Amino acid sequence: MNRKSARRQARRPDTSPVWPALPPYGSGQRIGLLGGSFNPPHAGHRLISELALHRLRLDAVWWLVTPGNPLKDPAALRPMAERIAEAGLIARHPRIRVTSLEADVGVSRTRDTLRFLTERCPTLRFVWLMGADNLPSFHRWHAWQEIAGMVPIAVIDRPGNTLHAIAGRAANWLARYRVDESDAATLADRAPPAWVFLHGRRSPLSSTQLRRAGQAETGQST
């Protein structure tokens, strides 16, 4: 390459993609994905993660702090940096990693997040983690059946949702793909659609209730 060609190449803008940083991982690992607003994060998120780590034999759980939820009021959403920082304080576990992946990639829909991750990390075995309080509204998620066909799903029991969760539209559609809880440790190895309902120690905490309590203390309306 002559000097003139080298100068022209040096002036060209770098158009290579800039990939967001991901938590460290190894080929073939089992990774649980817990998405949500984390507005605010609380001990219930950690409890769900610890249960999934143990029962699903996961290597790690990644918390995907979303920049926004199409199904929730954006006015109630606290700044992303605050939620990320607080989530890091709540997680306090060597195998729970807090990420801003969705903001970095520029997505807010679970389907798009999973597309990115499965293409970026084809050797990893992902499992989507969901509290039982989210299952009744799962059919309202964008491309929810496609999501179920992309990765296995673990639904973790929540107080007051044990029976309600499995009676909804999404649960009825998913019923034929349900894995017995005694086989939960095999979920990450199964081809989707596949899901399991996990029972265990439950936390009564919810982000909505914590926000309302905080607003009541400061005299704000909900």
Image: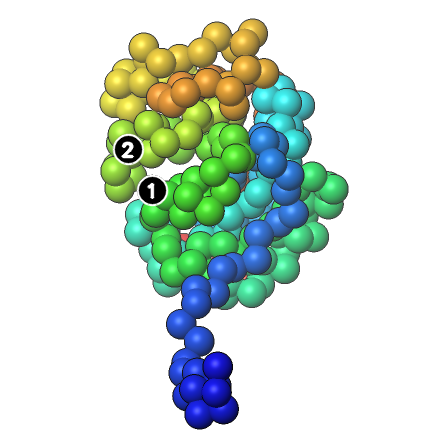
Q: Which mark is residue 146?
A: 2
Here the colouring is: rainbow
Judge from the rendering whether residue 3 lies leftward or rightward of residue 149; answer left or right: right
The residue lying at 34 percent from left, 47 percent from top is 112
Residue displayed at 44% across by 76% down = 14
Residue 23's spot in the image, x, y percent? 62, 49
Give the image quarter of residue 150: top left
The quarter of the picture where residue 147 lies is: top left
Q: Is residue 208 above or below residue 30?
A: below
**In terms of depth relative to the viewer, which is nearer, 123 or 171?**
123
Q: What number is the disc on residue 37? A: none
Nearer-the-camera pick, 153 or 20: 20
The amino acid type found where label 2 is placed reads: Glu
Q: Earlier in the sequence, mark 2 or mark 1?
A: 1
Disc 1 crowd, CA 10 A, few/some/many (<14, 14-19, 20+): some
Question: Badge 2, how many Cα within 10 Å: few under 14, some, many 20+?
Answer: few
Dividing the image into 4 quarters, which one contains the C terminus?
bottom left
Q: Is residue 220 above or below residue 114?
A: below
Is there CB contact under 8 Å for labels 2 and 1?
A: yes
Question: As drawn, is 64 to the left or to the right of 114?
Answer: right
Q: Name the residue that disc number 1 marks.
A: 111
Q: Helix, strand or loop at disc 2?
A: helix
Q: Amino acid at mark 1?
A: Arg
Res. 211 in view: no
Q: Nearer the viewer, residue 19 or 134?
A: 19
Query: Under tag 1, what secondary structure?
Result: helix
Residue 163, percent from left and from top: 40, 16
Q: Residue at x 58, y 48 (%)?
A: 41
On screen, residue 34 above or below 167: below
Question: Residue 120, percent across and down?
Answer: 46, 47
Q: Where is residue 216 shown, x and y percent of the image?
A: 51, 55
Q: Residue furthest front?
A: 2
